[in-house]
Amino acid sequence: ALIKPIRAFDYGSFKEYFNELRSDGEEFSDPLRETDKNLSRIIIEEKYAAYILDKGAALGIADLEVSVTARCSADGYWLPDRAYITTGADSAKRGKLSFEIESGLGLAPEELIWGERNER
């Protein structure tokens, strides 16, 4: 009586059902992985921008606007790719901020895109 249900169990159908569940799970999780990747990128970009804003504030640059883009490294980590910086600060303050960004984030000078803010 105990062995009959085990012998009657259709292992082939169970395996097929299990494979369908696995496939459905992968189809469901792929968009979630992509969403997670995009959210991670946005969070990292905002943290990099906040870093630059903090460094700018420490240098006395009050009119700073910053936007940072990130790229995914081969290891799967988000790294800063470009920084778009708008300010009316003089060249000395820009140079100091540029140095802080280069040393702190590893962005090369050509990856810093400066915009001029005209005060009215």
Image (cartoon, grey):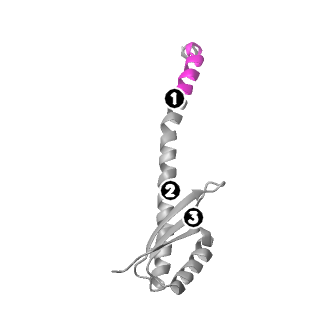
Residue at the spot of label 1: 21
Please, what secondary structure does the residue beneath circle 3 have? strand
Q: Position of residue 39 (x, y in %)?
A: 47, 54
Residues shaded magenta = 7-20
Q: CA distance from mark 2 to mark 3?
A: 13 Å
Residue count near mark 3 (Cα–Cα under 10 Å), binned few <14, some 14–19, many ≥20: many
Q: CA distance from mark 3 to mark 1?
A: 39 Å
Please, what is the three-letter code of the amino acid marked with disc 1?
Leu
Residue at the spot of label 3: 80
Please, what is the three-letter code of the amino acid marked with disc 2?
Ser
Q: Nearer the viewer, mark 3 or mark 1?
A: 3
* Residue extending furthest toward the left: 120
Residue 106 appears in the picture as rendered: no
* Residue extending furthest toward the right: 74
Q: What label sits on residue 99 in the rendered view? A: none
Q: Is residue 10 magenta?
A: yes
Please, what is the three-letter code of the amino acid marked with disc 3?
Pro
Above/below status of 118 relative to 3? below
Which residue is at 56% across, 83% downward? 96
Q: Nearer the viewer, mark 2 or mark 1?
A: 2
- Closer to the chain start, of discs 2 and 1, is 1
Where is residue 23, by image quadrant? Answer: top right
- Closer to the chain start, of discs 3 and 1, is 1
Q: Position of residue 29 (x, y in %)?
A: 50, 40
- Report the front residue among 95 and 68: 95
Q: Is residue 69 magenta?
A: no
Q: Main secondary structure of the magenta part?
A: helix
Residue 31 appears in the picture as rendered: yes
Please, what secondary structure does the residue beneath circle 1 have? helix
Q: Position of residue 14 (x, y in %)?
A: 55, 21
